[in-house]
Image (tube, rainbow, N blue to C red):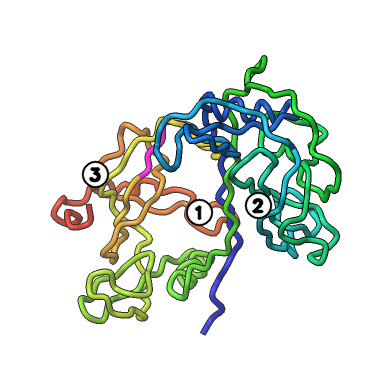
Amino acid sequence: MPEVLKAPLVVEFPFTRSLGPVQSAFLTGLRERVVLGVKTADGRTLVPPVEYDPVTAEDLGELVEVAPTGTVTTWAWNHEPRRGQPLDTPFAWVLVRLDGADTALLHALDAPGPEAVRTGMRVRVRWAAQRTGAITDIACFEPYDGDRPQLAGHDGRFEDMVTGIVAPARLDYVYSPGRAQTAYINSLSSRRIVGERCPSCRKVYVPPRGACPTCGVVTSEQVEVGPRGTVTTYCIVNIKARNLDIEVPYVYAHIALDGADLALHGRIGGIPYDQVRMGLRVEPVWTEGGRYPDHYRPTGEPDAEYDTYKELL
């Protein structure tokens, strides 16, 4: 059996969000080296502050300053820091109840080893050298055995408030297409398009899934299809995608390859976008060194009759 392919993939995008008055004050406070909590009607102080009481669901807005010192309530040692974590050397994840708060804040503790960390130990905030109004303005916590600092009693009003943040979201993973699609991808390298036939209903699926989606049985019989096919449906793309060197407008279509019982996606070229139509006969165009068809172009054949592809719309 040939080796199954696998490749590292990354899904990444910046998530932009606006802040309400409570979160705006909290993050602006961090920029100014002030930690704020929010008071509830029964006198509790929540840190980080939230806009609604998690017990009663009432609106919250009374901001109070708490100390940058506190007590570790629980912890876990991180032996191998990952990309984007607060420290690049082993550290402890800790929940810290800051002095003056009734809830705990999650952050990193810079400690030489797990033997130096314990529940109940005293810590303080280590501020980042450059602060922008984000949770990363707290670089981490560090062990502390001094007195609780005096507070100015800040009420959460600042100049130049932080009103929004950009939070990067990223997922790193290894993808494997499986046996069936590995064979499909390998066939493309020799400019062949291969599907698999269901032993029960005899339909040919491209790209193959390894099992028939209709009958639920395993498929293994390889069938070469195409390379020509028929446009079944299509759309006109008018918005240019980032890092995609294709001028808009262009057409992206479902193409039923000859011999296949499932249409696949492909870009249509070699014809004005407003002349693409259902039933148009097309063939793949390969670029030098390309591992899959760059686009499909008209073959010059008469259009296919609707009845020949109506089941593949």
Q: Could you tell me how many numbered marks the image carries?
A: 3
Up-down relation of residue 228 to residue 259 (above or below): above
Q: In the rendered structure, which amino acid carries the disc numbered 2?
A: Leu
x and y percentages locating residue 65 in the rendered image: 67, 29
Alpha carbon distance from label 3 to label 2? 61 Å
Mark before the other along the chain sequence, 3 or 1: 3
Question: Given contact means CB atoms under 8 Å apart, are the residues at marks 3 and 2 in contact?
Answer: no
Task: Write down the residue under mark 3.
Answer: 278
x and y percentages locating residue 94 in the rendered image: 69, 54
Q: Nearer the viewer, residue 63 or 232?
A: 63
x and y percentages locating residue 42 in the rendered image: 48, 35
Task: Write down the residue under mark 1.
Answer: 286
Q: Is residue 110 left or right of residue 107?
A: right
Q: Does the magenta stretch include residue 250?
A: yes
Task: Write down the residue under mark 2.
Answer: 95
Mark 3 closeness class: few <14, some 14–19, many ≥20 residues within 10 Å? some
Highlighted magenta segment, given as a residue range: 248-252
Residue that lies at the very extreme toward the bottom in this rendered image: 1
Q: In the rendered structure, which amino acid carries the disc numbered 3?
A: Met
Q: Residue at x 69, y 24 (%)?
A: 153
Of badges 1 and 2, the one in the foreground is 2
Alpha carbon distance from label 1 to label 2? 56 Å
Q: In the rendered structure, which amino acid carries the disc numbered 1?
A: Trp
Up-down relation of residue 275 to residue 303 (above or below): above
Residue that lies at the very extreme toward the left in this rendered image: 307
Q: In which quarter of the image is residue 134?
A: top right
Alpha carbon distance from label 3 to label 1? 23 Å
Up-down relation of residue 218 to residue 56 (above or below): below
Q: Residue at x 37, y 74 (%)?
A: 210
Mark 2 closeness class: few <14, some 14–19, many ≥20 residues within 10 Å? many
Mark before the other along the chain sequence, 3 or 2: 2
